[in-house]
Image: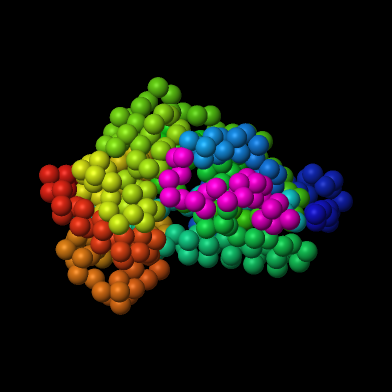
Amino acid sequence: MVEIQAKTGSDHRDERARVSEQIKSRARALGFQKIGIVRAEALSAERGRLDEWLRRGFHGEMSWMTRDPEQRTDPLKLFSEARSIVVVALNYYTSHEHSDSPGKVSRYAWGDDYHDVVGDKLRALLSWIEQEWPEAKGKVCVDIQPMMDKAWAVRAGLGWLGKHTNVITEEYGSWVFIGELLLNLDLEYTDENVADQCGSCTLCLDACPTNAIVQPYVIDSRKCISYATIESRAPEIDDEIAANLEGWLYGCDICQDVCPWNQMTPATNEARFEPREGNVNASPSEILALTHVAYAVRFRRSAMKRAKLNGLQRNALSLMSHPDHEGA
C-alpha cells in the first residue's frame, strides 16, 4: 500500500480527495467521459451471480470463464499491490446507420479495436500518474484481463446494469467501452451507485429474435447472435440462430438499438471509432472471397479479428443460406 502524503498540512482524507480529483481531471482530458474510483477488493455478491451463471452453462464454449473465478472476482489476484481501481467509460457512438443489406456489423467493431484505443488512453493516464507520484504503480485492464468490467463500472457509479446485461449510463446509454486502472495508491472512493432505471421496460427482452435474454439481467450466451457470430468456434451456426440472424454478420446490437436510453447518445469525439470502409455492413460475398493475407490486411487493429477468418466466412455462408432472414 502507498499512502498519499499530505503536502500542505491538510489531513490524509483531503489529500486523497485532491489527488483523486486530479486523476479524474487527467482522465477526462485524455477523452474519457465518465470516471469513478473504488476500493480494490473482492466482489462477493457478483461472484455468487457469476457462479450461478456458470452453473447453468450459459457461458457455452467460453471455457476460460470457468478458469479460476476467484481471480476474476478479486483484483488483488491480478495485482497484489492494488488499493484503488480507477474505472472509466468511453463513448463510442457514431451517427452512422446500418443499411438493409445483409452483413451488418456490431457498432462496437466499426472503427479501430477498442482494446487499443482504451488501452492507449489508460496507459497514458498511468504514465502521467507515475510522473506525478513516483511511488505509484499500476496495471491497465481492458477486457482481455480477467476483470468483471461491468460489475466494476456499476460499483464506481458510472451507470447501472441493464436488463440486456450491458451497463447503461444516463448520458451515453450503453454505447460505452469500459476499462480499469489498478493502482497501489489509497484514494477517495465513490460511495454512491446509480439506481436501476430500467423500470418495467422489457423492450430488449421482447426484441431479441433468439430469446437469448432468458430473464432480466441474465443472458444465455448459447442463444445469443453475438456469441454465435464471434465467440463460437463451431463449424456451423446453430440452425435456430441461423434462421434468425436478421442480417447480422458480426455481433448484434438489437437489444441496444431498442433501448430508450440509447436514443439520444451524442456522437463520440474519438476519431478512431469512425467506421472503416466496409465495417458497417460487410458484403458476405466479399468476406467469402478473402484470402488469409487479405483478411489480415483488412482487419488489422480491428475488433473483428476476434471471429477469425473461418468464423467470418462461416457467418457469411449462413447469411447467404437463409435469404429470408437477411434484412433488418
Residue 116 placement, left or right of 247: right
Residue 101, horizontal then vertical, whole percent: 16, 52
Count the labels in the image. 0
Residue depicted at 41% across the width and 57% down the height: 269
Residue 146, horizontal then vertical, whole percent: 58, 53
Residue depicted at 52% across the width and 49% down the height: 65
Tell whether position 71 is magenta.
yes
Relative to residue 19, is residue 213 depicted above or below? above
Residue 322 placement, left or right of 73: left
Question: In the depicted view, which residue is nearer to us: 145 or 314?
Answer: 314
On-image quarter of the C terminus = top left
Residue 302, horizontal then vertical, whole percent: 38, 65
Residue depicted at 55% across the width and 48% down the height: 66
Residue furthest toward the bottom?
Answer: 293
Residue furthest toward the left?
Answer: 324
Residue furthest toward the top?
Answer: 200
Q: Can residue 4 be seen in this view?
A: yes
Residue depicted at 15% across the width and 48% down the height: 322
Q: Can residue 264 be seen in this view?
A: no
Relative to residue 79, is residue 200 depicted above or below? above
Question: In the depicted view, which residue is nearer to us: 141 or 317?
Answer: 317
Residue 131, horizontal then vertical, whole percent: 70, 68
Residue 141 placement, left or right of 281: right
* Boundaries of the magenta span: 57-80
